[in-house]
Image: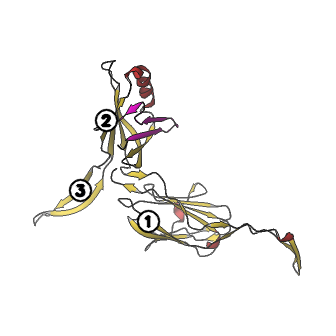
Amino acid sequence: MEQVILHIVRDDGLEFDIDNKVWMIPNDGLENWANLPHSVSVQENASYDGGVVTNKRVETVDRSVHAELANPADNAAKRLEAISFFSPKHTYEAHLTYQGRTLWCAGEQYAFKCDTGNIYQPVTFDWTIMCSMPYLLSEDNFGKDVALINAKFGFPYHSVVQSTPAGVYKRGFVMGVYDFSKTVDIKNDGDVTTFPRVVIKADGVVENPRISIGDKFVRFVGTLQQGDELVIDFEKRPPRMTLNGKNAINKVDRASSFTSFQIEAGDTTFEYDADSGENVMSVSLYYWKRYLGI
């Protein structure tokens, strides 16, 4: 029989496991982990039957778990541990393993109630996490380096010294080379659209770097110097662009699809380019797949 395991991580690093060893989840102990609340807005026609759908949205979801202590002999100590861990002053991640798959969500504690009944019966508690980002997420962020550096090491060639009219230079090691790949194929087998975070690092001068998915693109208007790091985070609402940690939203090309840059469910291709210097760009793409339930 597949076990149901909930691994909870608090924002200060403390962890709490419901893994059928100390605490366990009964058959009906999970709520709102396989469905999402949603709303549909309709504008009624003034002169005709029916109306027009104007909006569809998934709402904030409250996910709950009911847990029972495996051994009532541990009631006193384990009850106090649970009360101490589940504090409304903290933010939580909840990683649920169900039928062999693990997905996670993050949010604020909405409710916690610990049993104060018969002290000879196993202690129980109910915990609810309120998730303003309602989708369940893949465990891995599927980060991919688009501009890969392939390590290539060779013998030192005796550090050959050659003279030229301009002076003397040494030919030494080949430490690594860019493969100049400007595209990466993306397979989003999540249930819905997701939004990436793109990190561009300059190993030289880069003019007006540009990223694209399909017919949508985002272009930074400006020059990146060696060592600069440009982060474009579409997962944030609204999206953000920072250069070396400072807001750079004023550098976005106005023709960019800045608010609609996304990865649709299915297969797509991510590309990057620049007016110059694209061969000294290191481009990394990160995204979590989003699921409607587990």
Kindly report the distance in space between the C-alpha atoms of the residues bearing marks 2 and 1: 35 Å
On the question of residue 262 being in view, the answer is no
Q: Is 84 placed above or below 184 here?
A: above
Disc 2 residue type?
Pro
Kindly report the distance in space between the C-alpha atoms of the residues bearing marks 1 and 3: 29 Å
Disc ID at residue 187: 1
Q: Is 173 placed above or below 4 here?
A: below
Residue topped by disc 2? 26
Q: Which tag, 1 or 3, sits closer to the chain's start?
A: 3
In magenta stretch: residue 17: yes
Kindly report the distance in space between the C-alpha atoms of the residues bearing marks 3 and 2: 34 Å
Disc ID at residue 87: none
Residue topped by disc 3? 40
Helix, strand or loop at disc 2? loop
x and y percentages locating residue 77 in the rendered image: 44, 21
Residue shown at 46%/51% (left/top)? Answer: 139
x and y percentages locating residue 242 in the rendered image: 55, 58
Residue shown at 27%/58% (left/top)? Answer: 56
Q: Which residues are magenta?
A: 4-25
Helix, strand or loop at disc 3? strand
